[in-house]
Amino acid sequence: MANNSAVSEEFSTLPISIPALPSYPVPATHYVYLRRNAPKIATPDDSRSLYLANVPVDSTEAHFRALFSSLVGAGRFESITFEHDRKSVKISHEPAQAERLAKHHKKRKREEEELQHKKEEAAAELPDTWTRELHRSGSSAIALLADEKSVDSVLKAVKRLKKSKTYPIWGEGVKSGVPTFGSQWLKAHNKLSYPGNDAVQAMVDAYFTVFNRKEEEAQQLAKRLRNEPDEDGFVMVTRGSRNAPARRDEAEEAKQKMLDRQQKKKDEMQDFYRFQLREKRKADQLELLKRFDEDRKKVQAMREKRGKFRPEA
Amino acid sequence: MESNSPKRRKLDHAHKGPTFETVASSSMGASGSSAFVLETDELLKEVKLDYSSTFPGLDQTLRQFKEAIESLEQYGPIPIDEASKSWGKTTRTAIPYPDPKPTKNCPYKVAFEKPTHINVVGSYTSQTMVKSQSSFAVDMIVVMPTTLFSEKDYRDYRYFYKRAFFLAYITDALRKKFSDLDFVYTNLNGNALLPVLVSRPQGQSSESQNTESKELLGKPNYEIRIIPNAPEGYFPAAKLSAASNSLRRNSSEEAKDTNVPTPFYNNTLKSESQFVPYLKLLHRTSTTCASFKDACILGRTWLQQRGFGGDVADGGFGHFHWAVLMALLLQTGGRKGEPILSPSLHASQLFKATLQYLASSNLHKKTVILGQTTVAPEVVRQTGPVLYDSARGINILFNMTTWSAFMLNEHAKLSLSAINDPQVDQFDSLFISKVNQPLQIFDLFVKISVPPPTSQTSSSVSDGKSPIVVFAEEIYKTLKKALGERAKLINIQIPKSPAWKVTPSSTKPKNENILVGIMCDPAKASQGREFGPLYEQKKDAAKFREFWGDIAELWQFPSGEIVESVNWTEFSPLGYFGICQAIVRYIVTSRLKLTDGDLEFHGQEFSNIISLSPADKASFDAVKAAFSVFEKDVRDLEDLPLSVKQIAPIGAETRYASLRSPSPNRRRQGATPIDVMLSFEASGKWPENIASIQRAKTALLLQIGRSLEVAKAGIKTHLGLEDGEHETGNLAFLDIVYESGFSFRLRVHSDQEETLLERQTKDQTLDRYVRTEAAVLLSSARWKSAILPLHSQTISTYCTRFPALSSSIRLTKHWFNAHRLGNHFNEPLIELFVLQAFLKPHPFPVPSSTSTGFLRTLLMLASYDWREEPMIVDPSDSLSASQRLDISTRLEAWRKIDANMNRTTLFVATPFDATGVAYTQNIPKVIATRMTTLARSASKAAKDKGIELEPRTLFQSGLRDYDVVIHLSAKAIKGVLREDGTRHSQFKNLDESGSSEALPLPEPPVLALLRRLNLAYATPLLFFHGGPEDTVIAALWNPQIHDRGFSANMPSSFKPANTDADTFELNREAVLAEIARIGGDLIEKIDVKDSQR
């Protein structure tokens, strides 16, 4: 299992030995590939973070804390963000109108207000139903270390591993408090799936407080923007004016009506003139010929496949 | 016949009922008819034989035979006694006398004289043999001269004794001359009176039964049958009518009425002189009607696929009878004697019209006379089917059994309905599929061992029939009467009469069995009490009593009527199956003097596999009732902000289709509730944001829960969170637990959500991944809200229409689970498969039991061509032709963009889902292929083994095929379900008050684990698992994951390869170690296939 050369210029290989379990008593080595983080869109923390590819499925922050402290000593590791983390995917909860308006108008932000809103939004979050998330096999993560120096020392330590051949052990030195897998995990899931009606009610209430507030804000904004030319002299048309635009379903209904009317007109004029009848007959005949041709082709295809015409024994 | 010019005939037909022309033209009008004609043409090309290459040197052999026989010297006459003693001894050739053997002091003499002529007849000369025949028989008739016989020889087997000696003499000569050929005796068409000589080229299996054993390539597989014939018109036809008696010897012994008619004997004797006339008839017809031969070949193929043959064991209706019937119908058959068929018809039309005749002429019920006749119908009538050819004065179906006439009629009807159904592939069901599979047709089998023929009585009434046929007829009559309407079809399979050696040898009577197949009518058969005639009708009542014996009793209806009846209600808990079995057992043992040991019942084993019981229906009905209570409760709520549009049950329990019969809440176990979908009237109140809609739905659920708890006592509601991936997916459900009864899981559907999602999928400005995500969410929303409710309704309707559907569905589900395919096929899809097998049963009848329903589903899956044919399940025929065409076009489009069928393998469309892929999402090709393979091997086993099939073997699945096998610990799984102490509050008194009641389960633990594993390892591993009870998860490594170069985004865990620094290979050990960690105490052991590195 020796890895004799560097994987690539950029990535270095961090082998982790996996302790055998009674259910699968085979020693295994997991390989994490890491390098300095250099995303396309730079962030201020890039210099002190590491990009880790192929993290184990059951990784947690505690696991990596233990891993890094075994490599470079305690205190260097700050946090880790996993790819496809549920929390990291941002989904807009803005009301549709607010979203539309936001494209045209930058809102001024006030800090303390913002903080208050964040708190409210956090209260509206639904709880996790799993005590411990699984990551997709072969997924990546970004580890945030204390400073740039730590990154260097981690990379150095990884290089050293190659010589010493003693790999860090997965899960060693993990402080207790990491939820266990197995039946406890499933049991907890069963329980967490039912947070209790009252608790959910509170969350939903909190959510709609936020939502209603946003909607109101948007409405006020729209009102403010109404009839107010911007710097180019254009006036934005917004909902809520005296004659509001038709609702979507009404519009669709109207369209359907129009189509129906057109169809009816068309139907009435069919089979009216002699040429229409003649053309129709011609079309029927062609159709018949076409179908015959299709049938022949089908039979041909069946013959090619062979055995289709042989009665089963 | 010349007077019937085509034009004249047409006029005649103008004012008559449906005749061949309407049949032909109506099917010509249907969409597939021209294809049908083309297909039959192809079939004819395919099955036609090249005679010279199939039978090398046969003509020469025949000529040599002829010469050899003609050159024989006259012998005898010698007394019959001497012939059997001295001649047999000296020549070492047995004389095949029919039973009963001639008595010692018979006065008459036997002799051999030069035959008047020798001729080759049958399908060899008419060139109507087909390739798929199991063996080719070339019939050579040897007509005996009149000088051999005297006028009274038609009586008392005398003719047959003389014939036997004549045959033996020829045998002796040929045997000694042609040492390179094998010679055996056999009975012509299983008729014990007519032994014939069969010669085969050496090296072929001598047993006629074994001829099916695959023909060795290059080896000729034919036999020459030498059939001695009576001179034409020698015996007086008037003395041989169906009503006259020719066996004086027997009757005089019994001193009974001497006029017991012996129709079978008489007909056999008459048929002895009819070979040449029929040869002439067929030849003449084939010259006047160009497509006659082709139509004969079609008929032959059709009969052969249904197992019909001239042998009495095959039913006694073979290609000869087909050809004669058709030839006669070309001459006559109409009401005024005008021909039914026209010689100008195409072969496929001739075939269809003949089929129509078979279906409508009711051969099994009435006597049919073809042609102008002078004889009275009474002279013709006899037990068993009668098709009297008056020109030649013979019932051509004399060798046919009553039950096979029923079967023939049934098959003709089924085939006709297939022809007239434009949606069915008529061709395959008519000519290609093998229909002769008893397990696919019959529900109940009784194997009866035939008692040794001891008593004299059997031979006296037999009029020459072999005792086993007589016995079978007796059984048939008894069962038919006893079962009445309970049985739709009864068929009896009797063993073929074996060939025997031409040298004298003692034959041991073998213990033989006959097999009775019964197709039940589940609705009628489950009736617990048999009602007979009114008590006042003394005569009928006495008959009834006589038939049923001691168990007949009187029964008074509430209306005061008193009828005779028989009580079978004690068997009612066993279902119709148990009742029928009890009836058969009783009647056969009481009336036919058989013992229980002689009977062996088959067919119930399938239902026992998942312990189906007739009581299940009641529990399903209970669920439905509970649901309607629930529906009412929800509709009665007044404080909901939106008005309820529909509450639709979508759980399998509410459509009679769940694997386990539902039972009310099991408190300890945490049962899985029944899924219900709730939709509201369209409203503008929904927020215009998908994520917010989900929260709004949650709020609605909470409100419903609160109101329900207030409105009705004994209801507990629990809001549960969905194990979803996205905030935009459905977030929550509400479990409603009725204290005494079932629990329901309610989800809300919002129209607004669907429109928003639809808009997203079409919005080109959005990112691609957003659009695909929206498409996924949209399809799952539609699946739950639009498709499943309609699906549930459909299945539930058809479960009441087809009584066997529910149990067949459940057994099929079990089969999928047993082979660990259950996690890939959603239950509704399996239900559709089974429903399709019931809706399109061609060429079989509609399944009437669990076993036939299940086996027919497998048969359909085994041969389904998923690449070319969309499966369209259309129960009420609501799809128009153009819609069907659209569906086919859609399938073609799928196949065009994905020719390897990697993404969409199965394509199943219904009236409520025309896309064809809603049911079959996420079924990988590997899985689909595996299903087909398994179904194929199961169908093959059912076909080959017949009733010897042990049904359990179809449900056994090994673990050898899988790369990885994860054994779960049943104990730990139970532990997950068990209540643990942690939930108890710290206040002791609160625990007591029942707050620690088990919550319903969001998902069974193994399925939850599997889902998690599937999310993490969707790419490298393909998991196999069957049902919540299965404690094994098996898996295959994805073969498409190859070693590869490095990239930051690997599809799974990879490790550097040992050999090459730049390539990386799948880190299998690490993956399995991860699984072991995730499973923790749930996993007992992970086995890896040895061939792995």
Image: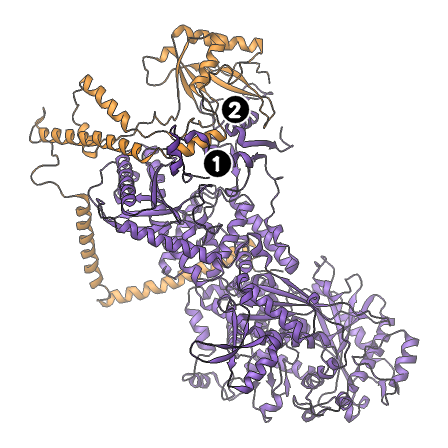
Q: Is residue B477 visible?
A: yes
- Residue underneath mark 2: B1054
- The answer to whether B6 is drawn above or below residue B1046 in the figure is below
Nearer to me, B892 or B93: B93
Number of numbered discs overlaid on the protein picture: 2
Residue sitting at the far top = A149
Q: Residue A111: image x %, image y %?
A: 20, 17
Kind of residue indicated by mark 1: Arg
Which residue is at a point 81% across and 73% down the rendered structure image? B64
Residue type at the position of mark 2: Phe
Q: Quarter of the image containing the N terminus of chain B?
A: bottom right
Horizontal and vertical percent position of residue B287: 59, 79
Reading the chain from its start, which is encountered first: label 1 or label 2? 1
Where is mark 1, residue-wise? B978
Is residue B1021 shown above or below B713?
above
Labels 1 and 2 in the same subunit: yes
Q: Is residue B263 left or right of residue B170?
A: left
Q: What is the basis of the colouring in this image? A: by chain
Residue A103 x, y percent position in the rendering = 19, 28
Badge 1: chain ID: B
- Residue for point 69% across, 81% down: B275
Q: Chain of mark 2?
A: B
- Residue A68 higher or lower than B99, as above or below: above
Give the structural element (helix, strand or loop) at label 2.
strand
The answer to whether residue B1002 is left or right of residue B50 is left
Residue furthest front in the image: B989
How far apart, in angstroms, are the residues tagged by discs 1 and 2?
38 Å
Chain A, hue in figure = orange
Residue A87 quadrant: top left
Query: Residue at point 64% right, 86% down?
Result: B394
Chain that appears purple: B
